[in-house]
Amino acid sequence: MGLGIGRKLGLHWWFLLCFSMSAWAADPPIYSHAKHGAIKGYDVVAYYSLQPGDDAVKGSDEFTYDWNGATWKFANAKNLALFKLNPESYAPQYGGYCSFAVAHGYVTSIRPDSWKIVEGKLYLNYSRFSFKRWEKDMNKKIAEADANWPAVLTVCEERGNCK
């Protein structure tokens, strides 16, 4: 079937189509745990009412919303409604991947309790250790991560290790 399409469209167009389709197959730019959903099922809106160092708030299966290729969970209907109004304002930076890792050119999962809000943006990290290293030189790490994002997703896909 593929060669038949190639003959009808011309081989050049067939290769272009196949190449383009591989770009469409990319993972969504959101860290999503297979079982728990985006950022391991924690409520991203709740972070904005926490004090620095507080534990993250677990979302509920009762309050979910599919956005940007992932299922987001919330602790209550109010947080769900706030997220629906403007998901971009609550979604974590770098798709919820570890900010420290993205600054160093790769992606990895996060621990929801390793977080900080900087200038109204939520940043998550893999562990308390990576969080402390990120926080020590936060402005530089944010600039480095901004420069690396979202190209790091291409790198992890090529290596088959988007986690």
Image: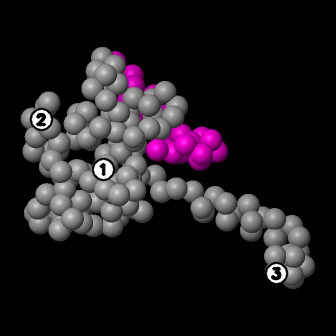
Give the residue furthest to the top. 136
Q: Residue at x 33, y 62 (%)?
A: 71
Q: Label 2 near label 3: C-beta < 8 Å?
A: no
Q: Is residue 119 visible?
A: no
In the picture, measured across the screen, residue 56 lies left or right of residue 139, that is left
Which residue position is annotated with label 3? 1
User: Which residue is located at x 19 percent, y 56 percent?
Assistant: 59
- Tag 1: residue type? Lys
**Which residue does the numbered mark 1 point to in the structure image?**
40
Q: CA distance from mark 3 to mark 1?
A: 41 Å
Distance from the alpha carbon under mark 2 to that under mark 1 = 17 Å
Q: Residue 141's spot in the image, x, y percent?
A: 39, 25
Earlier in the chain: of badge 3 and badge 2, it is: 3
Q: Which residues are magenta?
A: 137-163
Amino acid marked by disc 2: Asp
- Left or right: residue 26 versus residue 137 is right
Query: Along the line of sight, which residue is nearer the eye, 8 or 139?
Result: 8
Amino acid at the residue labelled 3: Met
Is 156 magenta? The answer is yes
Element type at marker 1? helix
The numbered mark, 3 or 1, whose residue comes first in the sequence reads: 3
Is 135 situated above or below 62? above
Q: Say which residue label 2 marks.
A: 54
Q: Is residue 21 visible?
A: yes
For the residue labelled by badge 3, is the local secondary structure a helix, a strand or a loop?
A: loop
Q: Position of residue 30 (x, y in %)?
A: 41, 52
Q: Main secondary structure of the magenta part?
A: helix
Image position, residue 20 (x, y; %): 69, 63
Q: Earlier in the sequence, mark 2 or mark 1?
A: 1
